[in-house]
Amino acid sequence: MISPRLITGVLCASLLAGCAGTSSVRTAKVTPIPAANPLYVATNNEDYLWERMVETLEDFQFPIAKEDRQQREISTEYKVGASIFEPWHADAVGFANRLEGTLQSVRRRVVVTMMPGEQQAGYVVNVVAYKEFEDLPGVAANSAGGATFLESAPMDRDMNQLVGQSAPSGWMSAGRDYALEQSIVGQLNYLLSRK
């Protein structure tokens, strides 16, 4: 007969071994060398640089909204900020940003621009990350009794009653997210150094 302690030990060991394995989700890598923003890239291959910029944004799981090659600009959709319970999302850099994303609704978007450098041998890549907080106008007027009829009042025939919030949620700008910008530039620098 197998003892319950042995079964519990094997189960715990297998769970810990599963948690220690590598993730199948591709996330941004940490680079030990911080890079300046804007980043000067010494390359003549504009297509290669463009693909590395797109790959970097995909590493951070930002959905691309628009790629404009003539303006040399990539814009992303808004992405809801990661919380403490979502370590696989790389958009919240550092514990303070993750805690903030846990306690407050946060969203971010990134705009990456690429301009020819002053020397003809390269490009200047600028990364700008915008951060916004959700600003609710007040408590939503959702009560359980809103759909019930009172026997003491005459029946109201208004068929256009509002259910839920009367106005859409607003977002307040929190400025730029410099930590995310540095992380994206560092990841781009890492991808370009692997050539």
Image (tube, rainbow, N blue to C red):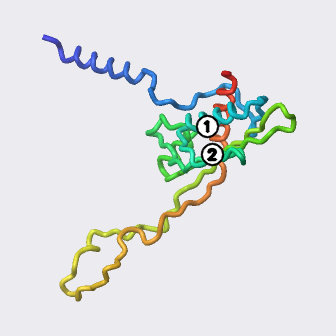
At horizontal 45% and vertical 22% (from top left) the residue drawn is 22
Instruction: Give the answer, above or below, for where 53 lies relative to 175.
Output: above
- Mark 1 residue type: Val
Q: Secondary structure at mark 2?
A: strand
- Asked whether 39 or 134 is in front, the reply is 39
Residue density around tag 2, few if under 14, some if 14–19, many if 20 or more, within 10 Å: some
Quarter of the image with the N terminus in it: top left
Residue 54, located in which quarter of the rendered image?
top right
Instruction: Give the answer, above or below, for where 155 lies relative to 82.
Output: below
Q: Secondary structure at mark 1?
A: helix
User: Which residue, as the protein is rendered here, is positioned at the far left?
Assistant: 1
Residue density around tag 1, few if under 14, some if 14–19, many if 20 or more, within 10 Å: some
Q: Which residue is mark 1?
A: 54
- Asked whether 178 or 192 is in front, the reply is 192
Residue 132 in the figure: left or right of residue 16: right
At horizontal 52% and vertical 62% (from top left) the residue drawn is 135
Q: Nearer the viewer, mark 2 or mark 1?
A: 2
Q: Measuring from the top left, give residue 38's x and y in whole percent.
A: 75, 39
| Labelled disc at residue 88 | none
| Labelled disc at residue 67 | 2
Q: Measuring from the top left, give residue 169's x and y in whole percent.
A: 49, 63
Quarter of the image with the C terminus in it: top right
Q: Measuring from the top left, give residue 85's x and y in whole percent.
A: 44, 39
- The CA span between labels 2 and 1 is 9 Å
- Asked whether 5 or 133 is in front, the reply is 133
Instruction: Give the answer, above or below, for where 191 lies relative to 60.
Output: above
Instruction: Give the answer, above or below, for where 185 lies relative to 172.
Output: above
| Marks 2 and 1, the one that precedes in the sequence | 1
At horizontal 66% and vertical 25% (from top left) the residue drawn is 32
Contact, CB < 8 Å: mark 2 with mark 1? yes
At horizontal 62% and vertical 48% (from top left) the residue drawn is 75
Q: Measuring from the top left, give residue 139's x and y in whole percent.
A: 42, 67
